[in-house]
Image (cartoon, grey):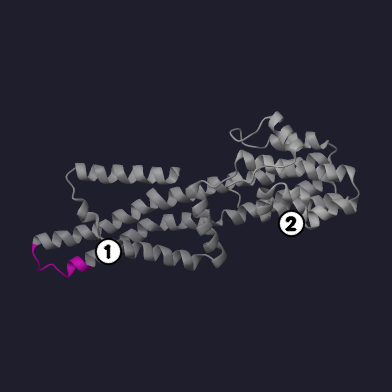
């Protein structure tokens, strides 16, 4: 929502200032200039990226515009799952715990936190490392190094839409110049026409330069940055899982290990110790609206 508000403010001030200076807004209505710019940008975007990145970019744009990121409810749900799994790991036989990590969809623990279960990547991340803990022959520092490597890989994959849109944003000013040059070429073919007509054609051509620059710095680049911020916030869930499980492997009680994870949550979303304790005791939470 903040992206839409900012875009409205930016467009309103820009067009309002142009009109206040005596400019005619109708001059800026040059649809074919924008067709050239947007079509070329879309074409180069498709050429430069695999289908998976193209699809993920669409998903990332929606997440950024609607602000679909990790909330306090999401952090509490994940801590609740981890606490329940660690209690099982600590107090029950190996075969009893394996049921939860081998088939999370059928696990009573994961079913109590449906928002976590909906995030398949995060669920698999949790189950994979709980399975390694069950096996029992891996050292905590080895697991930590493996987690760091996997989190780095996940971050790289999830930030591909940001990198793709940043490249498009960097190229838009040049594509605006391309549209302007094509407009000037058209104007050069009308040199024998009246000055009024020729001036209109040149003005229309310059709209291409304006459009490319504005779409780059006013829309695409800010949107790319918004995607980066939104997805980086979701990465905190993985870091929280890592810190919690490593603390547990190093001998911490489940409630203490959960506190290690709580400390990695950003300050604005970080629940209090009492909230985490109530959540882990209750053993369930409300489904998060922004779970992916």
* Residue 75 x, y percent position in the rendering: 66, 41
Which of these two is toward me, 24 or 275?
A: 275
What is the secondary structure assignment of the residue under circle 2? helix
Per the rendering, the mark at residue 105 is: 2
Segment colored magenta? 186-194
- Nearest to N terminus: mark 1 or mark 2: 2
Write the residue at 25% across / 60% down: 30
Which residue is painted at 72% across and 44% down in the image?
A: 241
Residue ID for mark 1: 181
- Whether residue 231 is in magenta: the answer is no
Question: Residue 72 or 218: which is nearer the viewer?
Answer: 72
Q: Dot 1, how many residues are within 10 Å of its Cα: few (below 14), some (14-19), or many (20+)?
A: some
- In this image, 185 relative to 158: left or right? left
Nearer the observer, 89 or 211: 89
Q: Residue 139 location in percent, x, y? A: 85, 47
* Residue 50 percent location from the top left of the image: 55, 66
Q: In which quadrant is the N terminus drawn?
A: top left
Q: Nearer the viewer, mark 1 or mark 2?
A: 2
Q: Does the magenta stretch mainly form a helix, a strand or a loop?
A: loop
Residue that protrudes farthest toward the bottom in the picture? 189
Classify residue 22 as left or right of residue 4: left
CA distance for labels 1 and 2? 58 Å
């Amino acid at each position: 929502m903040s992206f839409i508000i900012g875009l409205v403010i930016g467009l309103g001030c820009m067009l309002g200032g142009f009109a206040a200076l005596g400019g005619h807004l109708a001059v800026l209505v040059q649809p074919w200039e924008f067709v050239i710019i947007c079509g070329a940008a879309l074409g180069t975007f498709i050429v430069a990226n695999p289908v998976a990145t193209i699809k993920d970019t669409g998903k990332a744009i929606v997440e950024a515009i609607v602000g679909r990121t990790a909330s306090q409810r999401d952090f509490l749900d994940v801590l609740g799952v981890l606490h329940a799994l660690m209690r099982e790991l600590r107090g029950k036989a190996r075969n009893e715990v394996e049921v939860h990590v081998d088939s999370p969809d059928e696990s009573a623990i994961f079913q109590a936190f449906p928002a976590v279960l909906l995030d398949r990547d995060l669920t698999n991340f949790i189950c994979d490392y709980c399975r390694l803990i069950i096996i029992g022959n891996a050292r905590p520092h080895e697991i930590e190094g493996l987690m760091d490597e996997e989190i780095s890989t996940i971050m790289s994959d999830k930030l591909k839409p940001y990198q793709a849109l940043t490249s498009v944003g960097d190229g838009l000013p040049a594509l605006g110049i391309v549209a302007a040059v094509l407009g000037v070429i058209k104007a050069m073919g009308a040199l024998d026409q009246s000055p009024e007509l020729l001036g209109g054609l040149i003005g229309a051509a310059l709209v291409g330069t304006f459009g490319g620059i504005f779409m780059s710095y006013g829309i695409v680049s800010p949107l790319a940055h918004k995607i980066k911020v939104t997805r980086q916030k979701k990465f905190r869930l993985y870091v929280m899982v890592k810190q919690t499980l490593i603390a547990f492997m190093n001998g911490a009680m489940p409630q203490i290990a959960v506190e290690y994870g709580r400390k990695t949550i950003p300050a604005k979303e970080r629940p209090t110790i009492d909230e985490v304790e109530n959540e882990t005791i209750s053993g369930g939470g409300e489904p998060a609206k922004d779970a992916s």
